[in-house]
């Protein structure tokens, strides 16, 4: 029996598209935590990923939603309404 090419018995690791979709789904919950001043509950790795995607930004020592992040949230909410 041979192992998959990446060496993981579970199969290939999630690709960039899977990662971005996972982050898209997680963004509204993160925004709600920001709104309720509970940003400390957001995983540090997720914060870094949101910042790298320009969905959140650091401003004066605190996180805030960017215009891009707001648009992502709007797209998600309109997709759920359809």
Image (spheres, helix red, strand yellow):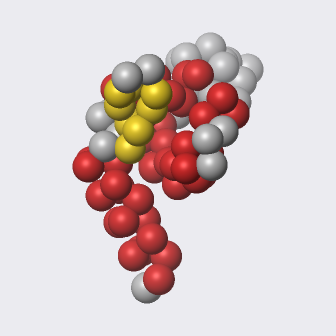
Could you tell me which residue is drawn at 26 percent across and 49 percent down? 67
In this view of the protein, which residue sits in the foreground, 25 or 16?
A: 25
Query: Do we see residue 17 in this rendering?
Result: no
Query: Do we see residue 19 in this rendering?
Result: yes
On the image, the x and y values in percent for residue 58 come to 38, 26
Could you tell me which residue is drawn at 62 percent across and 14 percent down? 7
On the image, the x and y values in percent for residue 70 come to 34, 55
Looking at the rendered image, the quarter that the C terminus falls into is bottom left
State whether residue 5 is above or below residue 53. Answer: above
Work out which residue is located at the far left of the displayed protein and give it.
67
Could you tell me which residue is drawn at 41 percent across and 59 percent down? 73
On the image, the x and y values in percent for residue 34 come to 55, 43
- Which image quadrant for residue 1? top right
On the image, the x and y values in percent for residue 72 come to 35, 55
Work out which residue is located at the far top of the displayed protein and give it.
7
- Which image quadrant for residue 78? bottom left
State whether residue 72 is above or below residue 42. Answer: below
Q: How many marks?
A: 0
Could you tell me which residue is drawn at 31 percent across and 43 percent down? 66
Left or right of 10 in this view: 18: left
State whether residue 56 is above or below residue 30. Answer: above
- Which image quadrant for residue 53? top left
């Amino acid at each position: 029996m041979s192992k998959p090419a990446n060496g993981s018995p579970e199969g290939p690791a999630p690709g960039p598209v899977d990662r971005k979709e996972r982050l898209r789904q997680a963004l509204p919950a993160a925004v709600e935590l920001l709104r309720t001043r509970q940003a400390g509950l957001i995983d540090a790795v997720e914060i870094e990923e949101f910042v790298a995607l320009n969905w959140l930004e650091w401003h004066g020592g605190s996180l805030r939603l960017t215009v891009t992040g707001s648009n992502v949230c709007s797209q998600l909410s309109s997709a759920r309404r359809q």
